[in-house]
Amino acid sequence: MTIFPKFVKSAIISEKLRSAIAAGIHQIGEIEIRSFDSNSRFKLCHVADVDGHEGSGGEDLTIYQGPGGAREIALEGADGSNRFLKAQENLRRGWVMLLDTVEDLRLALDQFYPACVGLWLAEQEGTLEVEHLRDKLRRQSGMYQRVRVLSDEALQKLVGQTCSSVVPCARRLMWQLDANTPLLPSAASCRSGIPDGTPAGEAIPLLCREACNHFVAECLAASKAAASPASGHSRPA
Amino acid sequence: MSIAPKPSSALLIVGHGSTQNPDSSTPYFEHAEEIRRRGLFAEVHCCFWKEEPSMREAFYLFDSDEIYVVPDFISEGYFTQDVIPRELQLSGPTTVLRGKTFHYCLPVGVHPSMTGLILRRAREVAPHADPAATTLIITGHGTGFNANSTKAIRDQVALIAASGAGYAAVLDAFMEETPFIADWDKLAPTPNVVVVPFFISDGLHSYQDIPVLLGIEAEIGPAASQREVFRHNPHALRGKSLFYSSAIGTEPLIAEVILDLVSDFDITHKH
Ligand code: SF4
């Protein structure tokens, strides 16, 4: 059972974000953050469109004023797939978002990468609580209780399959199976949460502090399949 | 009811969400945006069971030390009584956790103003249908999984029947329990029938399953195009005119219900 530490009372998240940008942070996941007017206005775009919005071919980019379009942009990948894991590396290109306040920047980033700014700030301050997988599975109720029976081996396999599927989730896995059982080295477990080639001090890492509910749903499917190998998957919610 | 601004408090709307249907969490964000626009709270955020941010991640969204938690669920039940308290670590109406105070409000669906929202939705979907020649059916899932949601629907039926709205009949019907929604034409004594799904969002039930049971769709189709289902009213089916509404939780006035629940919390627990 995880006990949360006492939280350090902190200044406003947005102001910390502004300071981080002033200190050189300019990327989160697949998004480039540019600031203007002494870090009071901001511009976001897909990292692959940076040249576009610098003026060479930027005419093709759809301009969004304010954070309102962030959820829509983040909803589906370029191929129309449903991005229910927002850290999946298939964010749509072709847009630029103009934000007039740091609060709007924070709102937009919380739509693109939910809670990731707050998670990162907590990690910086030493207040981020990591919850290991067995704790998460133990507290499941209802039909999800059966996930507790999965073996360590099955869980290690699920990490590789779920966190590094066809379109991998880019979050850094911070949890282990339990306090004494680290994840086996794999493409998934070795991710830094920062895009390849970006120096650590220039990007906000995407952090996974506990297994997501998609992961737990995959555990449920695996435990059902193990119980009756012949049965197919039921439709998830 | 109007709510006094709470500039040092935050609002957290908790929803179910879905990994299958990208539209299903849209109403939560719309309600959050509407409330944010009014500037009543220092912060307004959403979190989910099936989507990101999760309930435990939501803790990292807030600057505020006082947080009102409103479950955007249709009734009391497994999620409001088991999952949300467990995930947010709430132990009662008010819980102090790591220096923050959480107030746990009642779920949206049990608020008395839902009755008015259903009537409004029914009028919107069939503006020219004479209520005296119209049956209003409120439909839900049914089965023992959540007896409270069945009860919530029956309560609404009783309230609307007693409201003087003038419908020839007001009925409950369910996907998996009698009276079955598939029998809507036999249940309804009138030429016009309005069906309002008592769900918090348009998910697979309202897009896919109920349209098949009603006979609007021959078979379950792809989720992405299902909004079309709501655009072709009335459906001439089984000798009647059928008007099918989107889920009640998509109604923009749910934002008001969320604010009412915060006010109600203060009245009940703070005075
Ligand atoms: S468990 Fe974490 S890393 Fe794995 S898919 Fe879910 S969010 Fe991504």
Image (cartoon, coloured by chain):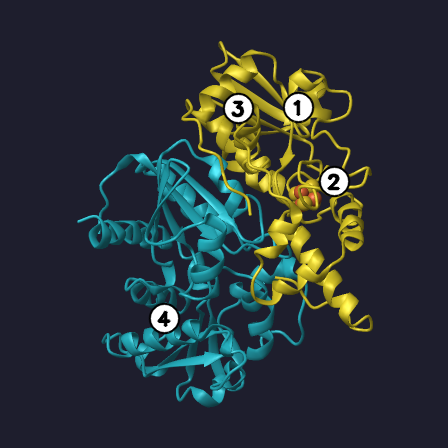
Chain colours: A yellow, B cyan
Give the side of residue A146 with respect to residue B137, left or right: right
**Vertical order, A98 against A224 (above or below):** above
**Could you classify mark 2 by the number of other residues whose Cα lies within 10 Å: few (under 14), some (14-19), or many (20 or more)?**
some
Question: Mark 4 touching mark 2, by CB under 8 A?
Answer: no
Q: Where residue B51 sits: x, y (%)?
A: 58, 49
Q: Earlier in the sequence, mark 2 or mark 3?
A: 3
Observer-side mark, 1 or 2, equals 2
Dot 2 falls on which chain?
A
Distance, label 4 to label 3, CA atoms, is 60 Å
Distance, label 4 to label 1, CA atoms, is 47 Å
Question: Which disc is residue B50 wearing?
Answer: none
Residue in the picture at 59% in, 65% down: B204
Q: Earlier in the sequence, mark 1 or mark 2?
A: 1
**Vertical order, A197 against B116 (above or below):** above
Q: Are marks 1 and 2 on the same chain?
A: yes
Distance, label 1 to label 3, CA atoms, is 41 Å
Residue in the picture at 42% in, 24% down: A12
What residue did someone put label 1 on? Answer: A59
Question: Mark 1 touching mark 2, by CB under 8 A?
Answer: no
Q: Is residue A101 visible?
A: no
Q: Quadrant of residue B159?
A: bottom left
Residue pushed farthest left?
A: B271
Distance, label 4 to label 2, CA atoms, is 65 Å
Does dot 4 land on a helix, a strand or a loop? loop
**Could you classify mark 1 by the number of other residues whose Cα lies within 10 Å: few (under 14), some (14-19), or many (20 or more)?**
few
Q: Where residue A102 sits: x, y (%)?
A: 47, 22
Which residue type does callout 4 highlight? His
